[in-house]
Amino acid sequence: MGAVIVPRLLDAGFDVVGWNRTAARAKPLLDAGMRWADTPRQVAQDSEVVFSILTDGAAVEMVALGGDGIISGLQSGAVYVDMSTIAPDVSRGVSAEFAAAGLDMLDGPLSGSPITVAAGTASIMLGGDEAACERVRPVCEAIGPKVTRIGEAGLACQMKIAVNLLLMVEVIAFGEAVALAEKGGVDRGVALEAVLNSVAASPVLGYRGPYILEGEMPDKPLADVTLQQKDMQLALGLARTLGSPAPLAAAANEMMNACRGLGIDNRDFVTAHEVYLRLGGQKI
């Protein structure tokens, strides 16, 4: 996601310094004007607002709290915003470490894909100190213009997990609906067009739905089954912890399990449509 976030910050006139665990991935951004730092600590030393966006809680803890982590370089008055989708309790734990050091850390998960970030239609949810949220709002708005403070630390992560639950159920249900229409004789392309012209249309189906057409599945998925199922596991774990029923999430998770069983989990998770076709005895 940094590959699309950094250009938006540069285009907005911000001076950007960055670090990546795989240095080679940063070259296009360095060519675009980003400055390089050797460690997360150095990024923090040189920045008023520090962003991270990582795969899981363990990676966030390492980058934020490790020996050369952000916490060791963040200056008083600066703000650290973690944009990762991780368990709320993990985010609260990191936030508590920063608070104990007299520093501000916010959970600020990004809702969107590389497509929506590049188009300027992504959104950011913020959790943590209200004054710190307002300090970072102008920078966040350069990344995604829709910025909402959800509440105290960890609540933005919780809200992002809830949003992703809805997104995953919606995309899985889309595959179910199109497969049903196909089974009854509707051409797949016609079914897709009908969905996207209906009241059930949504932004995520608008850019993901066409992937089910012949030859349109991208080689590099926006979010493959494995990555997206990580978020579903977070949702199911949170539902269990809070005692909140999530039967639709559980059913969608089983379809992602089926993708894994069929060996198609390396694709964008809209590929669950193929599972429905196979279960219905339809030709792939």
Image (tube, grey):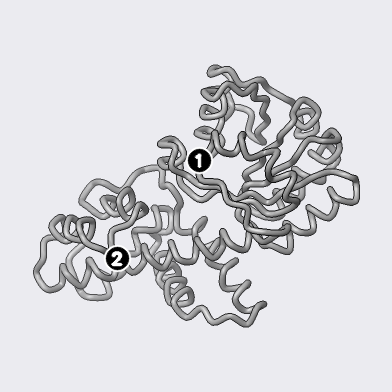
Spot occupied by residue 152 in the image (x, y as percentages of width and height): 72, 59
Q: Nearer the viewer, mark 1 or mark 2?
A: 1
In x, y percent, where is residue 274? 29, 64
Tally the marks. 2
Residue indicated by mark 2:
175
Q: Nearer the viewer, residue 127 or 70?
A: 127
Q: SS for tag 2?
A: helix
Kind of residue at badge 1? Pro
Q: Position of residue 75 (x, y in %)?
A: 84, 33
Characterize the local packing of mark 2: few (<14), some (14-19) or many (20 or more) Cα atoms within 10 angstroms. Answer: many
Report the side of 152 relative to 239 (left or right). Answer: right
Residue 15: numbered disc: none
Q: Residue at x 45, y 58 (%)?
A: 225
Residue at x-position 81% and y-position 28%: 45
* Rendered residue at 43%/58% (across/down): 265
Q: Which residue is mark 1?
A: 145
Residue 122 % position (x, y): 47, 44
N-terminal-most mark, 1 or 2: 1
144 sits left or right of 237 in the view:
left
For this view, does 141 lie left or right of residue 112? right
